[in-house]
Amino acid sequence: MPEFLSSWPFWLVFVFMWSGATVRGQATYWAGRVVTDQTLRRTHPVAGRARRLHDWLAGEGTERGIEAIRRWGLVVVPFSYLTVGFQTMVNAGAGVLRIGWLRYTVAQLPGALAWAAIYSTIGFAVWEAGLAAAAGSPWGLAGIGALTVVLVSTVLVRRRRRPTTPSTEPAVPEESVPG
């Protein structure tokens, strides 16, 4: 557990963790709901950082979260809090799908409570123990290094495979445009 939290009473650490999980989930939901919609609707960058951000917002990460919600329903929202990384995709996906705020919040609460319970008790200890064990042995360090190389290589290969020229197809198929 971070040093500044170790002297706090348990209930205060729990409330702090729950608040953090809830605020982060809500922020991700609203980013998915408002920012993505407005960005994709109003911008069409052709190059640079803006194009990469646009592609990321329209990319596979959010799509996996949306697909999980479509397949499993809102039950995936609380369970996503037991994962690392997938939680963000699901919360953003809920926003992109424009799931009603109250329905999303009710689905989010059990997940945020579970996340707070884990991280205010054993969560940080498990992370620290895993990192210490890996860093304490040559094989652990080699594993961390190999994992880092694989992750960086994967990101670089995916970036190189993406087309860099702007698409000539319209963003919205013509048959779906009213008029």
Image: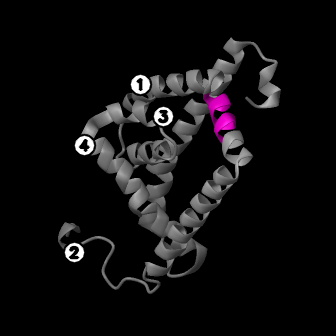
Residue named by callout 1: 106
Give the mark nearest the N terminus, 1 or 4. Answer: 4
How packed mark 3 is, by other alpha carbons closer than 10 Å (few <14, some 14-19, many 20 or more), is many
> Alpha-carbon distance for marks 4 and 2?
28 Å
Circle nearer the viewer, 3 or 1: 3
Circle nearer the viewer, 4 or 2: 4
Q: Amino acid at mark 1?
A: Val
Q: Is residue 172 left or right of residue 54?
A: left
Residue named by callout 2: 174
How packed mark 4 is, by other alpha carbons closer than 10 Å (few <14, some 14-19, many 20 or more), is few
> Alpha-carbon distance for marks 3 and 4?
17 Å
From this view, report whether residue 18 is shown above or below residue 27.
above
In the current view of this chain or complex, which residue is farthest to the left? 175
Q: Residue at x 47, y 33 (%)?
A: 82
Q: Amino acid at mark 2?
A: Glu
Give the mark nearest the N terminus, 3 or 1. Answer: 3
Quarter of the rendering occupied by the N terminus = top right
Would you say residue 81 is visible in this rendering? yes
> Which structural element holds mark 1?
helix
Give the mark nearest the N terminus, 4 or 2. Answer: 4
Q: Which residues are magenta?
A: 123-130
How packed mark 2 is, by other alpha carbons closer than 10 Å (few <14, some 14-19, many 20 or more), is few
Discs 4, 2 touching: Cβ within 8 Å: no
Residue named by callout 4: 71
> Which structural element holds mark 4?
helix
